[in-house]
Image (tube, rainbow, N blue to C red):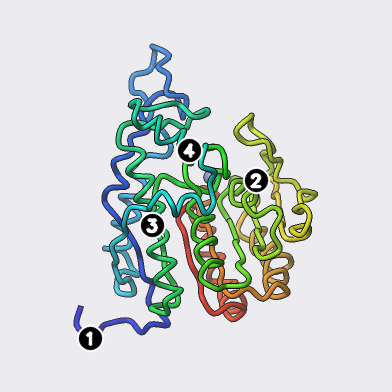
Amino acid sequence: MDSSTSPLTSERIDVFWEEGMLKHYTGTGVFDTLTDPGFLEVLEKHPENSDRVKNMVSILKKGPISQYISWNAGRLALISELLTFHTQEYIDELMQADKDGGKILCEGTILNPGSWKASLFAAGTTLSAMKHILDGNGKIAYALVRPPGHHAQPSRADGYCFLNNAGLAVQLALNSGCKKVAVIDIDVHYGNGTAEGFYRSDNVLTISLHMNHGTWGPSHPQNGSVDELGEGEGYGFNLNIPLPNGTGDRGYEYAMHELVIPAVQKFEPDIMVLVVGQDSSAVSFFSLLKSTKPKLFSSVPYIFILCT
Ligand SMILES: [Zn+2]
């Protein structure tokens, strides 16, 4: 791209991406069960497969906003970095599972050969993107990563997630001098892992909009209900916004304007992390950004966007 068409810093999105993240194979079966009932013509790909991310890369490279994108490489995370959010015992369990050639950590969440390295790429690439923003090299960064992370809790895997990429990014921001970080998670499922990691902290405001799915087993004990508000010093700093099935763009916009934006404005964060799983709707994310961008972006100087 020559300089005459280079986007200005203010309208440029710095995307961070590593091919190695594609090498996490989640298998086939019925939905995410990895089982073959014996009577299907074609086994389904696990819903968290590399195709979805390949298409995101392709859209950003060839689609209508390609001219606003600046591409950056990621990296592998260091084990010491993982310990800013996760427990040593849990990381040891994941490394042992990798050494043993794989392990089903919980329902639908399988670590296969290659998965651990892909997870380290996802975490490291997220940290590169956050560092880029913290160093003042851009205003909006997008970490395009998989495996996803927002269900991974400090000491357990959940919902196709091993390492909590958002949690690691938040910790890096805090450790780099940010006093307050806001997380807004619009994935259709509750961002329980990130919420759990900062449940006792008043430095991090975690907000999640999600369908009202409740707990889904031992790996996901949280309900995502409005009364899960945080604990101790963190009381009042976790905002759960469960939405009824069928909530459309207008419902999301209403929740953003009435609940999310006022909470973020009151909190006055130094930086905001948007966790944008795109399973709530095909258009929600764009619709939300369009209608809330002026208010949301004027509330905080820097935005960090993370693919769940
Ligand atoms: Zn989801």
Cα distance between the residues tagged 3 and 2: 23 Å
Q: Amino acid at mark 1?
A: Ser
Horizontal side, residue 105 vs residue 71: left or right:
right
How crowded is the residue under tag 3: few (<14 C-alpha within 10 Å), some, or many (20+)?
A: many
Query: Which amino acid is tagged 4?
Result: Tyr
3D distance between C-alphas at marks 3 and 1: 25 Å
State the residue position of label 3: 144
Contact, mark 2 vs mark 1 (Cβ under 8 Å): no
Residue 111, above or below 259:
above
Q: CA distance from mark 2 to mark 1?
A: 44 Å
**Which of the pair 147/296 is nearer the observer?**
147
Decide if ligand 1 comes within 8 Å of the CB at mark 4: no
Q: What is the number of the mark on residue 160?
A: 4
Residue 3 — which label? 1
Residue at image x 29%, y 41%?
23
Sequence-earlier tag: 4 or 2: 4
Most distant residue in the bottom direction? 4
Q: Which callout, 4 or 1, points to the residue nearer the camera? A: 4
- Mark closer to the observer (4, 2): 4
